[in-house]
Amino acid sequence: MGWSWKNSGFAMTAIAVGVVVFLFGSAISNHALLFLLDGLVIIGLARVIGTSTERVSKEIGSVAGALLGITFGNSVELILSLFALHEGLFEVVKASIIGGVLANLLLTLGISMMIGGGATGVQQFSRRRAGMNSAMLFVAVIGLTTSSIFSFLKFRASGTESLSIGVAAVFLIVYMGGFLFSFLTHRSFVSHFAEEDNTPAVKQKLLPDILMLFAATVVVAFISDQLVGSIQFVSSEWKLSEQFIGLVFLPLIGIAPEFLTAVIFARQGKIEGSVEIAVGSSLQISLFVAPLLVIVGLLMGKSLTLVFTPAQVVVLFLSTVLVNIVSLDGETHWFEGVMVVATYVIFALMFFFA
């Protein structure tokens, strides 16, 4: 599907609506309404990101398209968290880290399995990639829970912040290593991209979609500022804890770009791309977004530690175990997707009633 004014109409409309909502949002006195409106606008912009990524991936391949979807998708998560951090909403930020991982691992992956499996039956993907991703997921869980264990066991209180900074530094090194592994050791992918996709004609063809990706991301940044500013009012009006808003509401908005891209891949029978997005997005939140927030918080004079509640630690560990069980054989089907989504719903209900 190439570029045309017809299929760019929604993108330009969504971006225009986003600009209008940002400019006139301050005139809306109902914070709950503004919160919902901002969320819907971000989801609409997510579709722009998702469809543009899908068109670009037709030229550069599903794996590269998945990586592109991860990058732009998690920019929404990062932007939302940065604004929440700036407002001093530390519990919301930490809850959104766990919530983003859960939403990608369970909701995005589970629904992709359901959609793809319903269309094609048993689906297959790379066991080698699944094995590497499983190892990285466990490293991420270990890192995210180490500071929590340190705090629960009541070791030196002054060491919690230092430990979080150390874990953040290790995470960034692991993330960069995984990034280099994906690009430099997959010679066939690199060769394909270099030989077939790096031509002036293809670059010119992709330019409009790439511009739309950047424009949508910029507008998301402005809308996120408004949305985060409404969180405390919404928490009070709806009688919801900030933990639940961070664990469920913000991640559902934040993962919209990668969710839509993963669903598109699943409908096309490209479960490899869907798995790469779901697991890769979770890894990027754990190994890049979380440590970056710790470091940025340090620079901003806002101490953000990677200390999570016992419930958050347990559900994170159980989710990782479940995903490893359903993915290590390199095959999946729609009913596995149902079980994965059901697990997410159970966890969401637990935090709602907490």
Image (tube, rainbow, N blue to C red):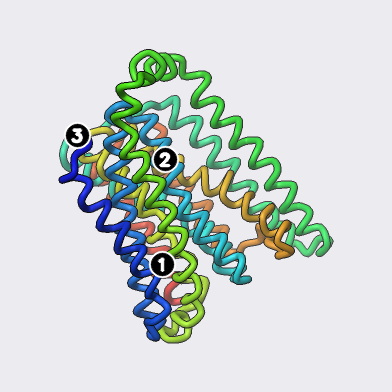
**Residue 17 at what x, y percent from top left?**
30, 64
Q: Residue at coordinates 34% horizontally, 79% vertically from top-left?
A: 33
Write down the residue under mark 3: 1
**Residue 314 at what x, y percent from top left?**
54, 58
Label 2 environment density (alpha carbons within 10 Å; few <14, some 14–19, many ≥20): few
Q: Residue at coordinates 34% horizontally, 53% vertically from top-left?
A: 46
Write down the residue under mark 1: 249
Q: Give above or below for 278 relative to 240.
A: above
Q: Amino acid at mark 3?
A: Met
Write down the residue under mark 2: 325
Q: Nearer the viewer, residue 207 or 49?
A: 207
Q: Residue at coordinates 44% horizontally, 25% vertically from top-left?
A: 128
**Residue 40 at what x, y percent from top left?**
31, 65
The CA span between labels 1 and 3 is 33 Å
At mark 2, the secondary structure is: helix
Q: Amino acid at mark 2?
A: Ile
- Image check: 96 left or right of 89? left
Label 1 environment density (alpha carbons within 10 Å; few <14, some 14–19, many ≥20): some
The CA span between labels 1 and 2 is 27 Å
Question: Is any atom of residue 126 visible in this view?
Answer: yes
- Image check: 159 left or right of 267? right
Choose the circle earlier in sequence order: 1 or 2.
Answer: 1
Question: Is any atom of residue 148 visible in this view?
Answer: no
The CA span between labels 3 and 2 is 36 Å
Nearest-to-viewer mark from 1 and 2: 1
Q: Amino acid at mark 1?
A: Phe
